[in-house]
Amino acid sequence: MMRIGTRISPDWLDRPEDLRFLTQIGVDAVDITMDMVPGYVESGGAVNREGMAMVVDKLGDAGLVIERANCLRQYFDEAYIGGPNAEQETRNGCINAEICGEFNIPVLGVQPYGPAGSNPNLPQLNRWVEGRGGYQHLKFELADAIAQATRADAPDREELWQRHITHYTAICEVAEDAGVKVATHGADPPVPSLHGYPQLIHSFESYDRLFSEVPSPANGVTFCVGTRYESGQNIFEGIRHFGEQNRLFHVHFRNVRGTIPENQGYEEVIPDSGDLNMYEVAKALHDVDYEGCIDYDHIMRLTTDGPAGREYIAYCVGHMRGIIQSLEATAKSG
């Protein structure tokens, strides 16, 4: 059966009471970013054993394990655009896969090229708006960003593909030997071009190309329910498609309202108030025997909540726990 996960940022390590809070409300595993590991940033994107051991021990003291360790995309920019440190960045990804295997971390997040790698000063696309009762959630308005013509400094799409293939081939080879799965989230927002820069992994078809070019069984998906729905594609078909290939490695259990093809944008909302029935989403995952983590992903702002979002986290975990228990009860009675 599926388990419940949550993303935590580096500052959580300094708050042991908050880590225990996660255990108390029923979180099974955490999703970390590699900058939580001492030495990762300083080395330019490679973790070391001592730093990872410290993180694993601190989380273990709270009763938590790491389910996914996510490489920060900016430490792969040169691998994708062909900079002088390209080979070293790919070697760093291989080191990260090897060390995840040593510490029994089952999933390594490796993200594709993003427009910020070419231009870090791009305009913001979202703003906070009010939902039911005054809670705040994010609204994205994309019409101008997706209508922009290709910029003069934009990398060539096919050259990007070839560099991605080289990068993923090397990392997946090490990950496969280490017993680690490489999970790719894909572009968010999920469009072919943003601000005049190409985006590669934005559709089911682009994932299919990645898996065709790098067919390793270690190569798979962080299936972000919100992102995939925003794209206008059928998420239930996507779950069946990648589930049957055993390429569903991690799931962001996020609900949204609106799609890009129809609305030129979307809103990220509290999980029971979007366009999707999240029980049906979980049922589709259960039907393809997905047994990894579901993670509520982004934190919305409740009016009485603190900066860490503990109340929102507890709400989402309770919502997911109820769905999982309903699936378990249905399976037993069926």
Image: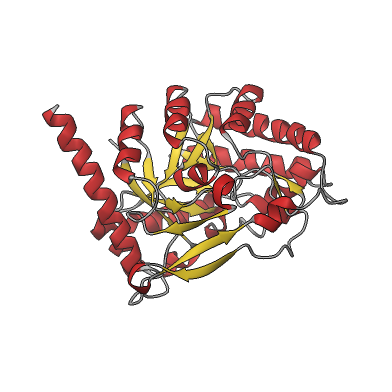
The answer to whether residue 288 shows anywhere in this view is yes
Residue drawn at point x = 55 percent, y = 52 percent = 263
Q: Relative to the observer, which residue lies in front, 304 or 131? A: 131
- The extreme right residue here reads 152
User: By what rule are the colours in the image chosen?
Assistant: secondary structure
Q: How many numbered marks appear?
A: 0
Q: Outermost residue, left direction?
A: 333
Point out residue 81 in the picture as x, y percentages from the top left corner.
Answer: 79, 44
Closer to us: 127 or 104: 127
* In-front residue for pair 120/76: 120
**Relative to 175, residue 130 above or below:** below
Residue in the image at 79% along x and 47% along y: 85
Rendering coords of residue 74 (x, y %): 68, 53
Residue under the point 25% across and 55% down: 318
Q: Quadrant of residue 40?
A: bottom right
Q: Residue 317 is drawn in which quadrant?
A: bottom left
| Left or right: 70 as drawn, with respect to 162 | left
Name the quarter where the C terminus is drawn. Answer: top left
The picture places residue 194, in percent across and down from the top left corner, at 70, 51
In the image: residue 157, left or right of residue 264: right
Left or right relative to 177: residue 62: left
Image quarter hosting the N terminus = top left
Q: Is residue 122 above or below residue 72?
A: below
Q: Position of residue 213 (x, y in %)?
A: 66, 24
Residue 44 visible, this orientation: no
The structure residue drawn at horizontal position 76% and vertical position 31%, both measured from the top left corner, is: 162
